Image: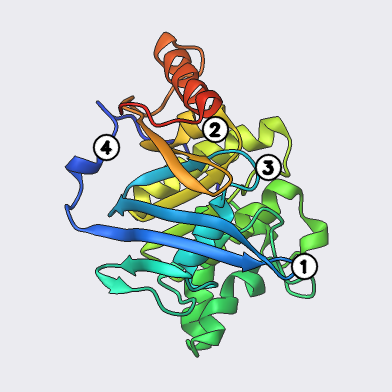
Amino acid sequence: MSKRSRPCARTGSRSPDSVASTETIEIDRVSQIFPTREGGSSWALRDVSLTVARGEFVCLIGPSGCGKTTLLQLVAGFLQPTAGTVRLGGRPVGPPGPDRGMVFQEYALFAWMTARQNIEFGLRMQSVGRAERRERSSAALARVGLTRAADRYPHELSGGMRQRVAVARALINRPRVLLMDEPFAAVDAMTRATLQEDLLALWQDAGVSVMFVTHNIDEAVFLAQRVVVMGAHPGSVRSEVRIDAAYPRHRGSAAFAELYAEVGRRLEHGVEQPV
């Protein structure tokens, strides 16, 4: 994600109603229960229903323990729900696959592989030929502004550069869905702002659906078309806020401040309110 990349100007944000009507992701009355050390059980999620339209950018926000990461893992296929159904394009979600790209907070790069090798890893697992892997990884590296870092190892890269590699690795498979679990939490504030802007540019270019977990209200309002507010004990969807603001968004504007305050109120009250 090059610093030269910026979200393109729009006359208004794309609302879910303006994209294709078929939901890419359907989470239908999903509950997730985990066993406890004491031999009991704990509700990570209880009766959660949520849809994400094709090409929509949705942020999940809420306190620790409200099941945000669990929800991403269910969509990714790392977990199977205790009850309910997760569907992608109308079909129940199966094991992890290239149609769902996952980006973690801690980069999750292979230390013994270069940036290019990390990006190509998924293609190798799919038995994609060397020439095609090279072509696609070169395009991915250019897309995130890391062409000159192709042969560097993770320890030779800054935190922001490592996260760019992780994003490129997810996008190279041309996924329908990009799942991001607090991907910018580990970088400094200036790098985080740049990565946010670059992510918006990539999203608008690739047209993928994005589910983005964050604890940061500012980040959610800056990025999302819709903010889903979750509550804990048990994890559930408490409210939603539509972010009807044009891109690029300006943090100093009165509209941004109003949306920030609205999301903050939903988090503080933790109860359902009219959307």
- Residue drawn at 46 percent across, 77 percent down: 97
Secondary structure found at label 2? helix
- Indicate which disc, 3 or 4, sits on the residue closer to the N terminus: 4
Count of numbered circles on the image: 4
The residue type indicated by label 2 comes to: Glu
Query: Would residue 110 appear left or right of 73 to someone viewing this image?
Result: right
- Residue 132 drawn at (x, y percent): 46, 81
- Indicate which disc, 4 or 2, sits on the residue closer to the N terminus: 4
Query: Would residue 23 appear left or right of 149 to someone viewing this image?
Result: left
- Residue drawn at 56 percent across, 52 percent down: 67
Q: CA distance from mark 4 to mark 1?
A: 45 Å
* Residue topped by disc 4: 14
The residue type indicated by label 4 comes to: Arg
Residue 6 in view here = yes
Q: CA distance from mark 2 to mark 1?
A: 35 Å
* Residue topped by disc 3: 185
- Residue 162 drawn at (x, y percent): 69, 55
- Residue 141 drawn at (x, y percent): 56, 60
- Residue drawn at 76 percent across, 49 percent down: 158
Label 3, residues with CA under 10 Å away: few <14, some 14-19, many ≥20: some
* Residue topped by disc 2: 219
Q: CA distance from mark 2 to mark 3?
A: 10 Å
* Residue topped by disc 1: 37
Secondary structure found at label 1? loop
Query: For this rendering, which residue is in front, 152 or 218?
Result: 218
Q: CA distance from mark 3 to mark 4?
A: 26 Å
The residue type indicated by label 1 comes to: Arg
Report if the CB atoms under discs 2 and 1 are less than 8 Å apart. no
The part of the image, by quadrant, that contains residue 86 is bottom left
Q: Nearer the viewer, mark 1 or mark 3?
A: 1
Secondary structure found at label 4? loop
